[in-house]
Amino acid sequence: MIRIKDIAEICGVSTATVSYVIHGKTGKVSKEVREKIEAAISESGYISNQSALSLVSKSSGLIGIAVMNHGENKNIMADPYFGVLFSYLEKEFRKNDKYILVLLDQSVDVIIRDARRWNLDGLILCNQLKNMMIEVSSQFLKPVVTIDASYVYEYDKLVQIFIDDFNGGYIMGQYFLSLGHKNVAMLDDSDLEVNRHRWRGFRQAYMERGIVLNEDCHYIIDINKEKFQDGLNRVFPEIKKHSAVFCVSDNYALQLINHLYQNGMRVPDDISVAGYDDIAYSSYSNPELTTIRQNVEEKAVIAVNSMMRMLSGKTVKHNVKLPVELVVRKSCREI
Amino acid sequence: MIRIKDIAEICGVSTATVSYVIHGKTGKVSKEVREKIEAAISESGYISNQSALSLVSKSSGLIGIAVMNHGENKNIMADPYFGVLFSYLEKEFRKNDKYILVLLDQSVDVIIRDARRWNLDGLILCNQLKNMMIEVSSQFLKPVVTIDASYVYEYDKLVQIFIDDFNGGYIMGQYFLSLGHKNVAMLDDSDLEVNRHRWRGFRQAYMERGIVLNEDCHYIIDINKEKFQDGLNRVFPEIKKHSAVFCVSDNYALQLINHLYQNGMRVPDDISVAGYDDIAYSSYSNPELTTIRQNVEEKAVIAVNSMMRMLSGKTVKHNVKLPVELVVRKSCREI
DNA sequence: CAGATGCAGTTATACGCATAACCTATTTAC
DNA sequence: GTAAATAGGTTATGCGTATAACTGCATCTG
């Protein structure tokens, strides 16, 4: 390991001078000395020790990304959405010279402990419930960005980024209506707020046409209590009676389609199915899946920029709602 | 932030005494003082500062996980395999009190710089080419574990974990033969060594039955040079002439199936297709995909254990070949 | 020409922690 | 009864870095 001290010795100056050069403190170092030091730095391949830097500067350069798993039997990281989100976050943070510390499926206490231990500069919360979000941000006291949460909670170091889920549900409802579907259902899972918005938007579209969708056609499989497949078996006899089913994720839509095929029903011939997320696979599933698309890269860019602005004390927009888009493919038909 | 100094003041002892208690140095502290300090620690929620610890102990507690993207147009993290691998690695490392630093798609130079900067204790290399593996381990000089690489390269701080890809190809070949397929093809992508093994094993199975598969039926889409979809369009007129196609990943198999459907061919009625990986989606795709399964959790457990053994100076097995299993579903038929 | 200012550095200190070296009082060994 | 060992601490030092405070000298100001 090469230290500032080594560079200083090579150049015959003090360590302070080297440090000033590294941090571009102008007016402290003469041109000749500066150039000599710069040459020594690049020649030796010196790179600063982040631990020392972090000790002295009170900033670790590390951002924690906490992802919560809801439901024991589900590994959320198997969902391509998170892998893609991760990769964009890493890419954008790297541009800002920040690194990512991964915190998967941990309690508030553990997240806070890890945050202190590593002196995290900020925290990104994905897929967290409302109370976790509030507890974490009120204990952490540094910038927090939540992704896919849209709770009413105002805090100056909190940015909530979410997609327009109400509208996602709403345009899917309108699309179903445009195909003539009146007897529709929604397949939902846990009680995440984002899911509720999709359901409300979906219902709203029908409401505007004078059709009231009550909770009878809102099938909820609580994946905290049962495996998705078991839940699907349970609700299947009822859900298959509808002419179109809006699923809260592509993943569930694809599983539902498979289940329908196994029971001799065809999609979209016998029943129409739509998803939500537009994961890569949906564009080449059979049938190709009609779904709601969001721009994951944009989401990550905004998350990172919001974080960086908060870190440098700038003002931020505390609630960012991102647009959503209907992607019509082949899993729904007109009746 | 609570420091050792604070605990020391609360208990009226020196910081050294507190440090000894924390590290369980027996025989240095009396029972009463120890208990007093332990109480103060748990009551105050003290947690050690990792930067300071890392400075003084020369061990950061951080393991780098580097994943390489091959092919500009492909985001490898969209493959559920990596998300799942990540989650298991994080889980196992956490048991050993190690944390993960994510390094996506970086060059050898950047990986080495980051490794020095963060004083990484070890490095996990996923999806890396042979020269990267060699360069990184020869420059890093600390423990390295490669996943999915099986190159002949001996180094005492290198563990290579890979699945028995030759056998994976071989049992798929035997399965195709058992269904009566003689006119078969393999759909492959880049020139990763793991893929070559699959092809060799596949060919070997046919060889043993006196059938020589030459490179004509080995379709390679070099995703470093073209998009997969473009490549698929290019090879499609030829590949569809075979009665069964073995694809190097589930992802490609599913895309091929979609392409076949779009061209009016049915799977497995008109052509049989098999994949490799057994990603979650393959169990509910239409048709459900016949594939080769590997145990990702086992792989992660072995990777982490190997790393931990190397870190504590114990001996390790430098090459670990994991078994592979044929999963018969519905995308292949007898002819 | 005295004092102020600017330049180009150095010295000293602090960040939080681990640990070697040291100290003192008591116990043990023979 | 004296030397040696042990128990139970404390003090001092260093890890790599940033930066405030200082120093010595040259130049400018009026």
Image (spheres, coloured by chain):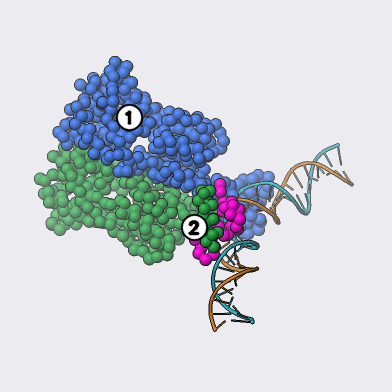
Chain colours: A blue, B green, C orange, D cyan
The foreground one among A223 and B291 is A223
Are the residues tagged 1 and 2 within 8 Å (C-beta)?
no
**SS state under label 1:** strand
Task: Decide if residue B253 is on the left or right side of residue B91.
Answer: left
- Tag 1: residue type? Ile
Q: Return the mark for residue A292.
A: 1
**Residue of label 2:** B59
| Chain to which mark 1 belongs | A
Q: Write the residue at 11% across / 46% down.
A: B334
Residue B185 at what x, y percent from top left? 19, 47
- Tag 2: residue type? Ser
Residue D12 at what x, y percent from top left? 65, 63
The foreground one among A269 and B211 is A269
Determine if the magenta segment contains residue B3.
yes
Q: Quadrant of residue B78?
A: top left
Query: Residue lying farthest top?
Result: A210
| Chain to which mark 2 belongs | B
Distance (Cα) linking label 1 and label 2: 46 Å
Quadrant in which the C terminus of chain B appears: top left
Q: Where are the magenta residues, as a range?
A: B1-29
Residue A167 at what x, y percent from top left? 36, 24
Residue B200 at what x, y percent from top left? 23, 55
